[in-house]
Image (cartoon, grey):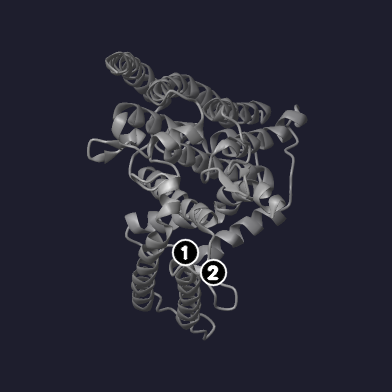
Amino acid sequence: MNTVLILLPLVLTLLYSLATVPVLVWMERRIAALIQDRLGPNRCHINGIRLGGIIQSIADMMKLVFKEEFLPSHIKNRFYYLVAPSLAFMSAFLTFMVIPYADTLTINEQSYSMQALPTDLGVLWFLAFAGLGVYGIILGGWASHNKYAILGAIRASAQVIGYEVAMGLSLVSILITYGTISLNEMVSYQTQSFFIFPAWGLFIQPLASIIFIVTAFAETNRAPFDAAEGESEIVAGYHTEYGAMKFGLYFVAEYIAMAASGALIVTIFLGGYQLPYLNTSELINNFELILWGIIAFAIVTSLLFLRWMKQHNIFAMSGLDETKIYTTVVIGFTIFAILVMSYYALGFGDANEVGVMLLQFAVFTIKLFFLHFVFIWVRWTLPRFRYDQTQKLGWNILLPLSLANIFITAIVVVGVNYGN
């Protein structure tokens, strides 16, 4: 049991980063199709099973894995050319290591941290490795010895100069407000109330929230800050000369960086793994009542999903009734989950701490996927900024606003502490 709880944060890090990439690609295509009023992926299947289009994402990943590797003959610095995608990938992946997925679990007086890397230097760790990711982009563009790749690398370096300072300064206001750099303590702070709102960073530091979220989009090199790729202008930018899994590492790194940025936004500005107004001890003390609410929510959600699927999943592949299979699986899983939750809700079991941990995992996941939706929504809504527009946005607008926010925050915090 001890080994399972120790390894659980590492497993969750892999799930939230690597394992969700096919799901994020599926979300990208589905949301883009919704915005553009089209169907999206719906043909790729395995013996008639399409999983709503996820099979298409899996097929694309398998294609990249088994595609023949090649090395352009004009590449001179082969070592740097080969190591650049790995640098971008590892930088994005390591930023996830300090994200807390739930509160510290205590069983038999033994505490288990729900961070893959249990450290109080969470914000500094994120900034350090998030900033390293651009080196993989610049190095790949330079080592490719291609004019379009070099242009993409130069654009990436210009962009990081534009947003990085504003991103760091926006976090200074947050650190002054919370009085800590520990991500777990930040989440605990947000269980309080702020007037009628929960004391989330989004409400107590709205300007810092906006600045950080805007710069987080630039950090992930996604539209409208994807000038480093600029496929309509410079082919594919820094990864023009990459193919197969070398391109796949860049591709996956973008989605992992998006997931890591979303996870940090959830942790700092959206209450993290906690429900509004409720801390962990209150969840444990009222867990049976919360379970009844979850049971009611599960029943209503399952019925709505089955009704929606019956109306929309009308295509048949290989003569297989896919809707009937999904209906059976959803009903069976819902009944099993309700029976298990009812067992504990009626007071027959005593595993409130573990139950609260699972609930916090679910809350964190829901908030994180909401941020994924926002990232994708913005990408398919706004046009690309030029690299000079990004610098003007960062230096002429976001930087002065972040400095003013630090000044105002410091005055308010000192005034409140002096009054107390």
Query: Residue 142, located in which quarter of the rendered image?
Result: top right
Q: Position of residue 377 (x, y in %)?
A: 36, 47
Q: Position of residue 74 (x, y in %)?
A: 73, 32
Q: Residue furthest bottom?
A: 319
Secondary structure beneath dot 1 equals loop
Above or below, comparing residue 384 to residue 338 in the picture? above
Disc 1 designates what residue?
41
Disc 2 designates what residue?
44
Residue type beneath disc 1: Pro
What residue lies at 30% left-to-right and 37% top-to-bottom?
193
Label 1 neighbour load within 10 Å: few <14, some 14-19, many 20+: some
Whether residue 227 appears in this view of the structure is no
Above or below, comparing residue 366 to residue 383 in the picture? below
Whether residue 85 appears in this view of the structure is yes
Res 202 label: none
Q: Position of residue 247 (x, y in %)?
A: 63, 43
Q: Number of callouts in the render? A: 2
Looking at the rendering, in which quadrant would you find the N terminus? Answer: bottom right
**Tag 1–tag 2 contact (CB < 8 Å):** yes
Residue type beneath disc 2: Cys
What residue lies at 39% left-to-right and 50% top-to-bottom?
370
Left or right, 393 with reference to 64: left
